[in-house]
């Protein structure tokens, strides 16, 4: 087919995931990704700082390190260098369960051992990757679809407590997002999540509810500090829980990589792309162990934004990664963003994760068959994934 007038054949052949957007269009789209995921790294840094009783200065350094790691991970995943990174629009976050394991390890063995455990787990992930690469191609689509559905459902469950107080702010955010998506067109529709966050934040400021005080003073630069707890201590037994978490995260990384490929319109190739995703996760986690925080994982949240806005360019998440690095190094900016109302961020997260769950259902609908053994596989996978959500008391002593 001939290229349109005024367009070269090379430009016409550019896949949407490789599209380079104008800077003025890219910046707000990148900011949309940052604002939607910011609560996770900020809350993680403060959770670890509280658990380890860090001073304000060390807390600021830890927050800086966490944001810089998230940004560096997004850049790795978006650009993909030397088969490290999937070259897909991915963001990166601290793993929620991994943070709890990190704090438990620090309480039992000290923070230096917790950092050593992160390094052991990340190195182990790199070691088992060649074997996993050989078997991932045999995962049936129904398993991947069920995994994606469970990711969405579980993240809705994790995010819901964020809107427990001042729920109306979350409703304003979700309503604003939905209204903008339904009413607006073109570029404005693509920024519907950002518009929803802006509407919720404006409502919070006008009513004085759900807002956090922004510290007026503090350093301008907040640089990450390597080895904040001293030289990491390596204890194989203490590292077992984090190693188990990284093994479990392989299935999640597989589902997210396939889901992201479908969201951008690229044919999924798990045997090629999943190892690239996991390598970036593992290398970013190695850096996290050196900087005093926990395991880093790819984020499902931004895949929902890609699906919702239909902006597929990986350069948008690369821009978001750069914004995160700058935010991590400029303390006043990180303090300002950390003051975003929690219900507003939670409301944006809920609508995004619901989109991910819907995408999982769509993957299941495209399965070749849905009877006999396939139904049993889906049922058992759903049972294993939903029991911890619907009946958590079964897992408490």
Image (tube, grey):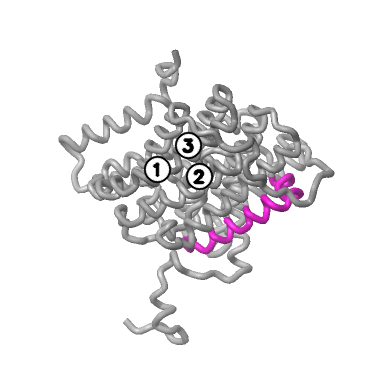
Q: Does the rendering let one see residue 169?
A: no
Residue 88 numbered tag: none
CA–CA distance in space, label 3 to label 1: 23 Å
- The relative height of residue 326 versus residue 104 in the rendered view (above or below) is below
At x 41%, y 80%, the residue is: 10
Q: Is residue 266 left or right of residue 331?
A: left
Provide the secondary structure element on which disc 3 rests: helix
Q: CA distance from mark 1 to mark 2?
A: 10 Å
Of the numbered discs in the image, which one, if any, rests on residue 285?
2
Q: Residues within 10 Å of mark 3 (few under 14, many from 20)?
A: many
Q: Is residue 178 magenta?
A: no
Q: Is residue 186 at all visible to an observer of this figure?
A: yes
Tag of residue 125 = 1
Crowding around mark 1 (Cα neighbors within 10 Å: few <14, some 14 to 19, many 20+) is many
The residue pinned by badge 3 equals 155
How many numbered callouts? 3
Region in magenta: 311-337
Label 1, secondary structure: give it: helix
For discs 3 and 1, the disc positioned in front in the rendered view: 1
- For this orientation, the residue located farthest to the right is 217
Cα separation between marks 2 and 3: 21 Å
Q: Contact, CB < 8 Å: mark 1 with mark 2?
A: yes
Q: In this rendered view, identify the residue nearer to me: 299 or 3.
A: 299
Residue 142: image quadrant is top left
């Amino acid at each position: 087919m001939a290229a349109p007038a005024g367009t070269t054949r090379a430009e016409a052949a550019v896949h949407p995931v490789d599209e380079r957007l104008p800077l003025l269009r890219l910046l707000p789209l990148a900011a949309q990704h940052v604002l939607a995921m910011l609560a996770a790294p900020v809350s993680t840094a403060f959770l670890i700082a509280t658990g380890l009783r860090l001073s304000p200065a060390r807390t600021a350094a830890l927050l800086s390190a966490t944001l810089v790691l998230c940004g560096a991970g997004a850049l790795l995943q978006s650009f993909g260098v030397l088969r490290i990174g999937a070259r897909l629009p991915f963001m990166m976050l601290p793993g929620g369960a991994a943070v709890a394991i990190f704090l438990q390890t620090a309480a039992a063995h000290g923070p230096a051992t917790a950092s050593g455990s992160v390094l052991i787990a990340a190195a182990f992930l790199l070691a088992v990757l060649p074997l996993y690469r050989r078997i991932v191609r045999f995962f049936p689509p129904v398993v991947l679809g069920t995994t994606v559905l469970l990711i969405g459902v579980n993240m809705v469950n994790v995010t819901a407590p964020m809107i427990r107080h001042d729920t109306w702010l979350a409703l304003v955010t979700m309503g604003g997002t939905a209204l903008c998506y339904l009413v607006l067109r073109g570029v404005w529709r693509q920024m519907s999540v950002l518009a929803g966050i802006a509407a919720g934040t404006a409502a919070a400021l006008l009513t004085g509810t759900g807002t956090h005080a922004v510290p007026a003073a503090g350093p301008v630069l907040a640089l990450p500090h390597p080895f904040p707890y001293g030289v990491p201590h390596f204890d194989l037994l203490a590292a077992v829980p984090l190693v188990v978490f990284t093994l479990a995260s392989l299935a999640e990384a597989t589902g997210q990589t396939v889901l992201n490929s479908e969201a951008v319109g690229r044919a999924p190739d798990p045997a090629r792309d999943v190892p690239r995703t996991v390598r970036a996760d593992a290398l970013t986690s190695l850096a996290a162990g050196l900087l005093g925080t926990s395991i880093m994982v790819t984020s499902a949240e931004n895949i929902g934004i890609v699906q919702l806005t239909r902006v597929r360019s990986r350069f948008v998440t690369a821009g978001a990664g750069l914004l995160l690095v700058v935010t991590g190094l400029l303390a006043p900016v990180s303090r300002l963003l950390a003051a975003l109302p929690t219900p507003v961020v939670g409301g944006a997260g809920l609508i995004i994760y619901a989109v991910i769950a819907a995408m999982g259902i769509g993957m299941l609908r495209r399965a070749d068959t849905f009877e006999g053994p396939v139904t049993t596989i889906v049922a058992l996978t759903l049972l294993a994934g939903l029991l911890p959500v619907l009946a958590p008391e079964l897992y408490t002593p």
